[in-house]
Amino acid sequence: MLNLTEKHALIQKIAEKLAKEKVAPRAKEIDSTGAFPWDLVDLYKKQGFLYLMLPEKFGGLDGDITSLCVVTEELAKVSGASSLIPLAHHVGVMPIMIAGNEEQKDYLYSKIAAPDNLCVVAFALTEPEAGSDASHMRTYATKDGDYYYLNGKKAMITNGANAQIYSVFAATDSKKRTAGISAFYVEKDYPGVIIGKSEDKMGMIGSDITELIFDNVRLTKDNLLGKEGQGWDIAMSTLNLSRPAVGAQAVGLAQGALDYAVDYAWKRVQFGQKLADFEGIQFMVADMATKVEAARALVYDAAHLLDMKVYERDKMSAIGVDKLSAMAKVYSADVAMSVTTDAVQILGGYGYTKEYPVERMMRDAKATQIYEGTNQVQRIVIARDVFRHLHA
Ligand SMILES: Cc1cc2nc3c(=O)[nH]c(=O)nc-3n(C[C@H](O)[C@H](O)[C@H](O)COP(=O)(O)OP(=O)(O)OC[C@H]3O[C@@H](n4cnc5c(N)ncnc54)[C@H](O)[C@@H]3O)c2cc1C
C-alpha cells in the first residue's frame, strides 16, 4: 500500500475512474484492431494527463514524476497500449522540460496545452544500427551558416506516426562521441520529415512504433535544446526521469493480471473445489502479490526522490537516483513478465486464449523489459553505480 499525498491520491482516483469506465471497455478492441485510440487521447487531454509535466501556468504539475507514475499505473492495469501512448508522450516532453529555454518552452507548451489541438510528442533516440549502443547514432545535424541540416533514420519510435513534435537526438560532431550529440525539437510538418514503416509488434498493439526519416530537414538554432554537445546528457537525464514511470506501467500490468487471476481462481472449480483452495495456487498468488508490492515500493521511492528535484546530474550520482531509477524499471519489468505469465498459468487453457485479457497483458509486459534501455542495460547501470560507490 502506498502513502500518497492528498494531491497524488486525488490524481489516482481520477485515473482509476477513467481507466475503469472508459479505457477498460476499449482494451480488447484496441488490441485486436491496432487502431490508434484518438478518442482516449482526447479524454486524457481533457483530464490533464497530456500535460502533467508542464508548468502550472499551462495547467501542469511542473515535472511531477509521482503523478505520471500514478496515472500510468492505473491505465496499465486495464490496457498496456493505452498507458504507453501518454507515457511515451511525456518521455518526448522531458528533453524540452530539462533543456528548453523560455521561448522554446512557451512555444511548445502552448501547442501541447492548446484546447483545440491534440498534440502528441515522441522521443526519438533509437536507430536501426544504434539501439542499446545509442551513442553510435548515424543521424547527423550538419551545421551550415545559421542552419543545421538533419539527415538519418530513427527506428521504433512510439507515437512516431501520430506525434506533432519530436525530441530528436543527432550527432553534430561525430568525432566527439557522446560529447558530440545534440538534442533538437522537430515538428512533423517540416519539409523532409518522413514517417517510415510502422512495426507489426507482439504487444502494446494500438500504440505505434514507427521509423522516422529525416531527409535534409532544415533546422535553426531555435530548434536546438540546450547547447550543442549536451544531447547525450539530456537523453540520459530524460531516461532517469522516465524509468520509474515505465516501472509503474509494469506494476500496473502485473496488478491487472493478478487481480484477474485471483478472481478467476476464486470462481473456477476443479476436483470439486475452488482453484483458490489449492495450496499450489495459493503459493503462486502469494508470490505474485508480494512481487507486485515490492516493485511498487521501488517505483514510488524512485519517483519521490526525483520529485525532490535531485535529478541534476551532479547531485544524481551523489545519491544514486540513476541506480534507483534503473532498479525500479528492471525489477518491475521482470515482475510484470513473471506475474502475467503466472496469471496465464492460473487460467490454464483459457488463459492462453484471446477471450481473456491475461495473454494480452503478458504480451504487453514483454515490452517493458526492452524499451527505455533493455533490462540488461539497466543491470549495467546498476552494477556500474554499485562499484563506483565501492571505490568512492
Ligand atoms: C514497444 C517499443 C517501443 C519503443 N519506443 C521507443 C521510443 O519511443 N523511442 C526510442 O528511441 N526507442 C524506442 N524503442 C526502442 C528501444 O529503446 C530499443 O529496442 C532498445 O533500446 C534495445 O535496442 P535494440 O532493439 O536495437 O536491441 P540491441 O541493442 O540490438 O540488443 C539486443 C539484445 O542484446 C542485449 N545487449 C545489448 N548490449 C548489451 C550489453 N552491453 N550487455 C549485455 N546485453 C546487451 C540487449 O539487452 C538485448 O537483449 C522502443 C522499442 C519497443 C519494443
Image (tube, rainbow, N blue to C red):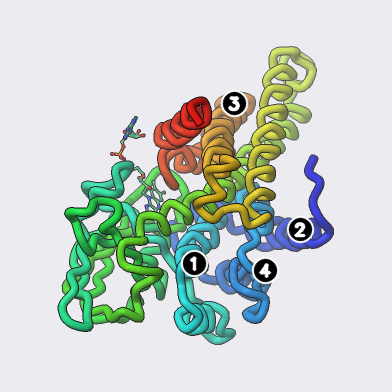
Q: Considering only order in the chain, which callout, 3 or 2, is on the residue closer to the N terminus? A: 2
The residue that label 2 is drawn on is 8
Q: What residue type is labelled 3?
A: Asp
The residue that label 1 is drawn on is 93
The N terminus sits in image quarter? top right
Q: What residue type is labelled 2?
A: His
Dot 1, crowdedness within 10 Å: few (<14), some or many (≥20)? many
What residue is shown at x 62% (from left), y 74% (from top)? 55
The numbered dot on residue 61 is 4
The image quadrant of residue 276 is top right
Examine the rendered structure and indicate whether residue 151 appears above or below residue 269.
below
Q: Considering only order in the chain, which callout, 1 or 4, is on the residue closer to the N terminus? A: 4
The numbered dot on residue 342 is 3
Secondary structure at badge 1 equals helix
Secondary structure at badge 2 equals helix
Q: In which quarter of the image is ligand 1?
A: top left
Q: Position of residue 123 (x, y in %)?
A: 40, 61
Q: Where is residue 312 in the image (x, y as percent from the top left)?
A: 54, 56
Is residue 8 shown to the viewer in this render? yes
Q: Considering only order in the chain, which callout, 3 or 1, is on the residue closer to the N terminus? A: 1
Q: Which amino acid does label 1 sit on?
A: Val
Secondary structure at badge 4 equals loop
